[in-house]
Amino acid sequence: MPSPADQLEALAQSTNLDPLGSAFAEALDAQDPLRHFRDEFCYPTRAEDTTEDQLCTYLCGNSLGLQPKATKQYLLEELEIWAKRGVLGHHSHAYQRPWLTSDENVLQESARIVGCKLSEVAILNTLTVNIHFLFAAFYQPTPQRFKVIMEAKAFPSDRYAVESQIRWHGLDPAEALVTLAPREGEHCLRTEDILEAIEKEGSQTALVFFSGIQYYTGQLFDMKRITEAGHAQGSLVGFDLAHAVGNVPLYLHDWAVDFACWCTYKYLNSGPGGIAGIYVHEKYAQPDEERPRLAGWWSNQKATRFQMRDQLDPIQETAGYQVSNPNVFAMTSLLASLTVFGRTDMAALRRKSILLTGYLEYQLTRRPRLSGKGEGKSGGITIMTPSDPEARGCQLSLLLPAAAFRPVFAGLSEAGIVCDEREPNCIRVGPTPLYNSFQDVYRFVQVLDDLMAGQAA
């Protein structure tokens, strides 16, 4: 398959357009089969009192996804049911979404997005809570097998959760936690180094726990090979998919991943603090003494749940990891977004994502000031994220010269460009294929180029 750069240059030649110009971005949008989804979302304005013609260019779906237009209506309907039906809304619901089974409305699409069986997915809690729930079942250290392997620069909440789980078992993270960092002078971990470390730790490893996509660099890890390597050593393997779910195709069941968890407020657009999800392979459907799991009344079989028995009658699938009834409003907000996902698929989103992110990279690397090849004192921008489309999702992490970082990020904000910053000098840019356009990317790069020119003056 041609690289994104080759595709872009071929189209530029066929249309006789400058690939760095605005007309080319318009041409790319005109041929985008997913462009109509843009109309399904709300876009922030530059200030609370500005009008629709002052919309922001939003490139921050890797942090918080945009609100689907359907969300407001869905939530208003739930408020209506609450107002008119009260507790009866658990069973009697004018919009066919009774609260007692609200999670069932989002399971099919969630399973499709993460690539697993319906029985292997559950929607519950929030992300870090679910890490603890899953570690409670899957981290069962012994004197011989007690180590956890993870990234040195994993999202801090993951690190805190894992270290606390290790201490919970009376172990010292200094001995039980193995963290992997990139080689000197590199930004990303090499797959061969990950596999080598898993083999080196061998039978001492209880769990390999990695991100699907590294939040800071945007690197997409080879989850299939990591899982195979862990299993070859007799270890269990799990993933935090916060930055991967809804971003890249996933095949958790086929890869035989043991467990995974994710939030839904980034690429799945469920809203700030939205409800989270988990996957557990079907071979762990039944709780046992070797792998006990935390329980509550929502872990109980639905048919006997309200008989209020003293003895738990556990659900024999991933839904059994639930402990309490879910937040209906959070579940409904997720449902509103998944109805949009349900009208496309991850393969189509991935095709656009590869080209859209490739277009961003093309622009950044071919403009002299941004690439560092032009005159001036700015020094150019370094892209931390792998250039191989198969090793990244829809985020590029940009390192700016230290002196330029603050004024450039402030300038982007003033221009209505929404992306995010990470200390000490990183800007993460997330062109999300479900709602971002090529013109969004063009505008970001044009403003960034102008700001860097000001720094070089």
Image (cartoon, grey):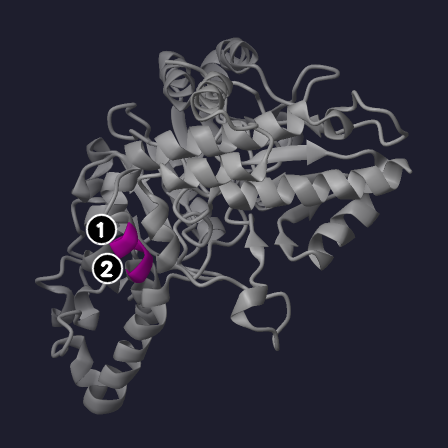
Element under disc 2: loop
Q: Which residue is mark 2?
A: 103
Q: Which residue is mark 1?
A: 107
Element under disc 1: helix
Q: Is residue 147 magenta?
A: no
Which residue is at the far bottom? 84
| Residue drawn at the location 49% of the way across and 9% of the way down | 199
Front position in the image: 376 or 118: 376
Front position in the image: 53 or 381: 53
Mark 2 and mark 1 in contact? Answer it, CB < 8 Å.
yes
What is the three-letter code of the residue carrying label 1? Leu
149 to 58, vertically: above or below: above
Front position in the image: 165 or 356: 356
Horizontal side of residue 358 vs 125, given as left or right? right
Residue 396 location (% of width, % of height)? 59, 33
Quarter of the picture holding the N terminus: top left
Q: Which mark is residue 119?
A: none
Write down the region rendered in magenta.
336-340
> Around disc 2, counting alpha carbons within 10 Å, would you say few (fewer than 14), some (14 to 19), or many (20 or more)?
many
What is the three-letter code of the residue carrying label 2? Asp
211 to 191, vertically: above or below: below
Horizontal side of residue 17 vs 423, given as left or right? left
Residue 230 location (% of width, % of height)? 41, 18
Quarter of the picture holding the C terminus: top right
